Image (spheres, grey):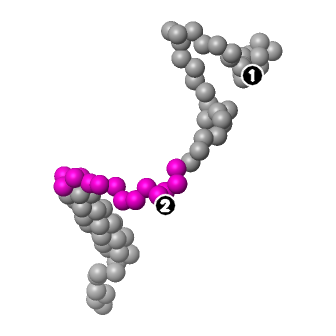
Amino acid sequence: MILLNLLNPKTVASIPDNHFAVVHPLDDAPEQKVDLSVLGSMPMTTSVRLSLWALRGYLIVMSLLVLYHVMDLARAFRLETH
């Protein structure tokens, strides 16, 4: 029974300055969400824009390689000879 008492949530009224309180997100009060329609576009530097284009190219190339490998395993590129 002692173990079950440890698992019950406790309410803390005050926290000393040298301690931290950890609150589980399900036990925390709900917060106001950001309205995305009023934010507008995010400014990006040239290096960020180039990095994102490089990442996009990398993901496209890797996706094509996976597609090629799957089609090769399915023997889609081999001619049947009798």
- Main SS of the magenta part reads loop
Is 44 magenta? The answer is yes
Q: Which region of the structure is painted magenta? A: 34-48
Judging by the rendered image, the residue that carries numbered circle 2 is 37
* Residue 80 x %, y %: 31, 87
Q: Residue 39 or 56: which is nearer the viewer?
A: 39
Snapshot quadrant of residue 6: top right
Residue most toward the bottom?
Answer: 82
Snapshot quadrant of residue 59: bottom left
Judging by the rendered image, the residue that carries numbered circle 1 is 8
* Residue 50 x %, y %: 20, 57
> Residue 69, can we see it?
no
Instruction: Give the mark nearer the N terminus: 2 vs 1.
Output: 1
Q: Residue at x 40, y 59 (%)?
A: 40
Report the amino acid beneath label 2: Ser
Give the numbered dot on residue 28: none
